[in-house]
Image (spheres, rainbow, N blue to C red):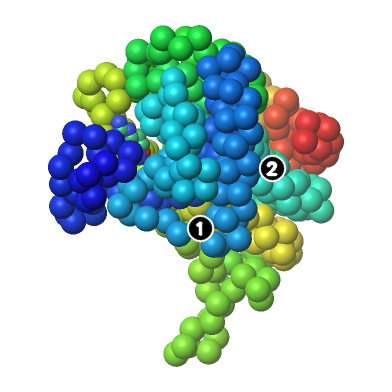
Amino acid sequence: MSQSKANKLWGGRFADGPAALLEAINASIGFDQRLYPADIAGSKAHAAMLAAQGIISSEDETAIQEGLDTILQEIESGRFVFSAALEDIHMNVEARLAELIGPVAGRLHTARSRNDQVATDFRLWVRNAIDGFNEALKELQAALLDQAETHADAIMPGFTHLQSAQPVTFGHHMLAYVAMFGRDRARMRDARARVNESPLGAAALAGTSFPIDRKATALALGFDRPMENSVDAVSARDFALEFLAACAICATHLSRLAEEIVIWSSVQFRFVSLSDSFSTGSSIMPQKRNPDAAELVRAKTGRIVGALTGLSIVMKGLPLAYSKDMQEDKEPVFDAADSLSLCVQAMSRMIREMTVHTDNLLAAASAGHATATDLADWLARKLGMPFRDAHHVTGALVKMAEDAGGDLADLSLAQMRSIEPRMTEAVFDILTVQYSVASRTSFGGTAPKNVRAAIRAAREKL
Ligand code: ARG
């Protein structure tokens, strides 16, 4: 090659090197270098297949395999020098291979293109991230289950509209999150099945005339099968969108739990205290214990949902097959995965180390006429009143209690009878929060015995 400034890999028809600005906008090595384990694994599988098919010699394969092993060690030990002039991880690895083993390196790219290479690498990366989330979310579920078990019959106010609604147990409330994170894991598993197909061998977009064995490379890389259509194989990024969608939904769940922790740990609620290691002080107000980590979990949901929106817009309207736009797929996925991973881990620790103030939960549950529905149910059941009438009578009793500055259970039988003459002493039993939760035995209800059974079932599933 006479033109020294031209790119070594595709410089055949370029006389000049790229302008600095082109290099700056074009290079992805700054962020795609983290694909290196997948990139090298993909190359090793490809080289083995080329040799097995008689497309390259076994001596050449050996040289390539050894060179790739050396590169892996160089990257892992921090000795590898990444170059922006070489654009991306694929060309950085290939150029280094040429330095190490000479022109034989050029045979590795037979029957392959960076288009199928990057799609392969990225799928392997996302698959690995999914497996990590499966474990991390399981750990979070375990932390929630431990709190649920300890407080299986601790009574707290259940809320709707953040207004006291009906008493529930703290264990039941924790189990709601166990269920949500269980679905998040299932969503990740579902996404994994579609991620786990191999684009390798689709080459630039049309396949290749070399007698390659796509099944062999797919299986070597742990994929379930090769993707069926070569154009689809290099142009599809719905696997990344689906992963981001699963991350975004999971983040919204985390943000709801985070928000509850922010509310519950406030002086006004005092339902829980975060451990010292998860509370921060204020530089001016000495009394403060701020739930910064919970607030940041709540906030990071913004960038995770943003990543899904961002990549959706990158992909919208792109003609088939590969376009360089698709290089913008990686940063949102990396950022969302990193952020979500931090959030899940921080939340697990916060939940594990959180102290639950059951006396405050009980006091809060007993205020705000939280057993009014129990009274209405009782009127309907015992007196045979239509539920709408029972609701009306109970509403009148709540108003009477409120006018007297007290709670429903503070009314006397005589006061109650002034509104519903058939009222009996038995009504006072059903006005307790203990009765209320114990009576909610319907499937999925908050009765402590249901909660205990649900914890056992959830533990078995885990
Ligand atoms: N760095 C590129 C990316 O991430 C690799 C694929 C480049 N393909 C190409 N035809 N220029 O998408």
Gap between marks 1 and 2 measured at Cα: 31 Å
- Taking the spot 23% from the left edge, 25% from the top edge, the residue there is 318
Relative to 380, is 283 on the left or the right? left
Give the residue displayed 54% in from the left and 62% down from the top: 79
Q: Quadrant of the N terminus?
A: top left
Depth check, front residue: 269 or 182: 182
The mark found on residue 258 in the picture is none
Question: Which residue type carries mark 1?
Answer: Phe
Residue 421 in view in this figure: no
Q: Nearer the viewer, residue 157 or 309?
A: 309
- Residue at 20% x, 46% y: name it: 3
- Residue closer to the observer: 337 or 51: 51
Query: Helix, strand, or loop for circle 2?
Result: helix
Sooner in the amino-acid sequence: mark 1 or mark 2: 1
**Residue 321 shows in the view:** yes
- Which marked residue is nearer to the observer: mark 1 or mark 2? 1
In the rendered view, would you say 359 is above or below 305? below
Residue 382, x across and y down, in percent:
71, 26
In the image: residue 30, left or right of residue 407: left
Residue 356: quadrant of the picture: bottom right
Q: Is residue 187 left or right of residue 450?
A: left
Identify residue for label 2.
135
Check mark 1 vs ligand 1: CB closer than 8 Å? yes or no. Answer: no
Q: Identify residue for label 1.
A: 80
Check if mark 1's residue and mark 2's residue have beta carbons within 8 Å: no
